[in-house]
Image (tube, grey):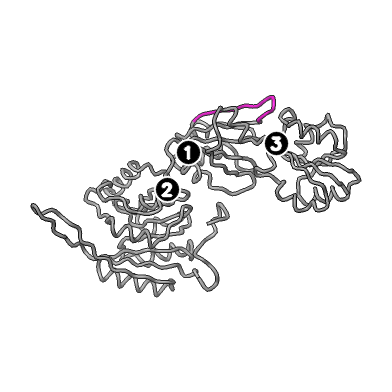
Amino acid sequence: MVYKVHVLGMGMGNPNTLTQEALQALQESDLIVGSRRLLDTLAAFEVPKVALTRTQDIARELRESSARTASVVMSGDVGFYSGATGLYGHLDGMDVHVIPGISSLQYLCAKLRVSWQDAHVISVHGRDCDVAAHVQSHGKTFILSGGSTTAQDICALLVARGLEDVLVSVGELLSYEDERITTGTAAQLAQSEFAALNALLVINPHPLVATTAPGISDDAFARGKVPMTKEEVRSLALCKLRIEPCHTIWDVGAGTGSVSVEAARMATLGQVLSIERNPAAIELLHANKRAFGLTNLRIVEGEAPQALQGLPRPHRVFVGGNGSNLEAILRVAFDANPQARVCITAVTLETVSQALLCIRELGLREVDMVQLSVAKAREAGAYHLMTAQNPVYVISAWGPAWSLEEGQDARYTSPKSGRE
């Protein structure tokens, strides 16, 4: 069994970027273990080399080897998306020395003369990740790419999300002789081809700023003659929806988009689908989307429930008074995600009755209904009078598959990120 193990980061893989401590560790080693790509760069060290990447295989080799000192080489830095983390628990009984390397984050930012202490860091190398969601909500995002997701794929995803103008720098084959760093907009680079070994830095000058509570004034929206969910009702409805940053939200019958706008400002890592059939309302939706700079708001033109088919799976669904098609809308939503939470607003008693029948028919959980009566002050000469608005019913519930008794806390696993 090996008695002394150096776990060292090799940076991008070029031996010229190794620290003096790492070079000394390699010189005193009787065995070097790591990926084939890294071992090929260490030909100058004339000791046995074993190409392994799986944690269990590396640990087995170290325990069965007759070498007394070994180096396990890892790409990048051992604390930055590294397999070293999983290896440590398999090295009991060995004298383990950890030697950090230069990460691709450090290297690329240094080449670009950009600081990285404020960078948001993600990896798509062997992981599912909604890259556009992270970029849309951060001013500076570093992306460790690789595997089946290429740099051009990432740029294409950004373009599809409306982020075509963000500035992207792609670093290929970093630290090697044929290193190349290309900078351009996402739209420009989506048409390019890059080497598989790369990393990206994305600068978004206008990231979404998350809000923790609703309350935008009605006067801030372009309104026209299209119905709008007013500020007080909107605030209560959004609270009842319990939106989290990574949620996907359907706003069915979006109207001017007041609910969509506020929901998008809360779900900065998610997205809002605004479904609307009225051409005048669609025009206002686009105007309000532009005014608030919301790249995570997508406008879907068409009538529900037909327009809901094929949309991304929702965490939350808001329906504003669509009594005639309510049951069909809810069935599509809960077919897509039976754990989704829904909020329905209604003005007429007929819509309230229809909503309660649908809730009973669909077997929704934890049903809550509030009647909200609002009166707002208006000036009358030197005085102020209160003017009452129509009472509004706000009905909310969890989907039929939600169950607190079974330990579910209304969270749903996204196929993109493995998290809610």
125 sits left or right of 226 in the view: right
Label 3 and label 1: CA atoms lie apart by 26 Å
In this orientation, which residue lies closer to the viewer: 358 or 37? 37
For this orientation, the residue located farthest to the left is: 381
Point out residue 2 in the picture as x, y percentages from the top left corner. 87, 46
Residue 146 in view of the camera: yes
The residue at the point 46 percent across, 52 percent down is 245
Q: Which residue is mark 2?
A: 210
Magenta stretch contains residue 200: no
Residue 196 in view of the camera: no
Near mark 1 (Cα within 10 A), the count class, few <14, some 14-19 or many ≥20, is: some
Q: Secondary structure at mark 1?
A: loop
246 sits left or right of 395 in the view: right
The residue at the point 55 percent across, 59 percent down is 413
In this orientation, which residue lies closer to the viewer: 187 or 130? 130
Mark 2: which amino acid? Ala
Point out residue 19 in the picture as x, y percentages from the top left corner. 73, 31
Query: Viewer-nearest of labels 3 and 1?
Result: 3
Q: Which residue is mark 1?
A: 139
Give the mark nearer the N terminus: 3 vs 1.
Answer: 3
- Relative height, residue 147 to residue 367 (above, below): above
In this orientation, which residue lies closer to the viewer: 115 or 200? 115
- Relative height, residue 386 to residue 52 (above, below): below
Near mark 3 (Cα within 10 A), the count class, few <14, some 14-19 or many ≥20, is: many
Label 1 and label 2: CA atoms lie apart by 13 Å
Numbered label tally: 3
Q: Which residue is mark 3?
A: 101
Q: Secondary structure at mark 3?
A: loop
Residue 81, quarter of picture = top right
Q: Which residues are magenta?
A: 174-184
Give the mark nearer the N terminus: 2 vs 3.
Answer: 3
